[in-house]
Image (cartoon, grey):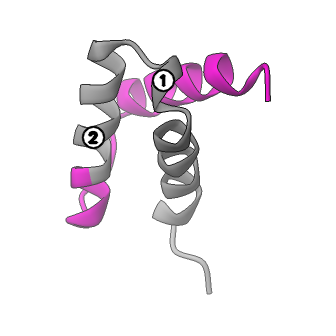
Amino acid sequence: MAHWTDEYMVLVRDCELRESRLTEWERGFVESIRTRLDAGAGLTMKQTETLDGIWERITARG
């Protein structure tokens, strides 16, 4: 069964693969989200929205 963090880890991995498209702040943010998810910690609504926004922007061009 899929764990609730799986979806977010996919977004994090996508962001990491497109690291060159991230700002310095976004790189740090994505790294902190990975650390939280690896530790089994949840994300706040704001963190989820921010991650979604970053992912949308950097994957818009493929």
The answer to which image quadrant residue 17 occupies is: top right
Check the image and name the residue furthest to the bottom: 1
What residue does disc 2 label? Answer: 31
In the picture, measured across the screen, residue 17 lies left or right of residue 29, that is: right
Q: Earlier in the sequence, mark 1 or mark 2?
A: 1
> In 3D space, how far apart are the residues under numbered discs 1 and 2 (Cα atoms)?
14 Å
Quarter of the image with the C terminus is top right
Up-down: is 37 above or below 58?
Answer: below
The tally of labels here is: 2
- Residue 47: where, in percent of width, then height? 37, 30
Q: Looking at the image, which residue is at 38% across and 12% down?
A: 23
Q: Residues within 10 Å of mark 2 (few under 14, many from 20)?
A: some
- Asked if 32 appears above or below 54 in the picture, the reply is below
For label 1, count other residues whose C-alpha is less than 10 Å away and answer few (under 14), some (14-19) or many (20+).
few
Location of residue 50 in the rendering, given as x and y in whole percent from the top left corner: 45, 22
Could you tell me residue 52's position as x and y percent? Answer: 57, 29
Q: Is residue 7 above or below residue 47?
A: below
Q: Name, please, the residue furthest toward the front.
A: 20
Q: Which residues are drawn in magenta?
A: 35-62
Is label 2 in a helix, a strand or a loop? helix
Q: Residue at x 51, y 51 (%)?
A: 13
Q: Secondary structure at mark 1?
A: helix
Residue 45 numbered tag: none
Residue at the spot of label 1: 20
Kindly indicate the quadrant of the structure image that contains residue 24: top left
- Residue type at mark 2: give it: Glu
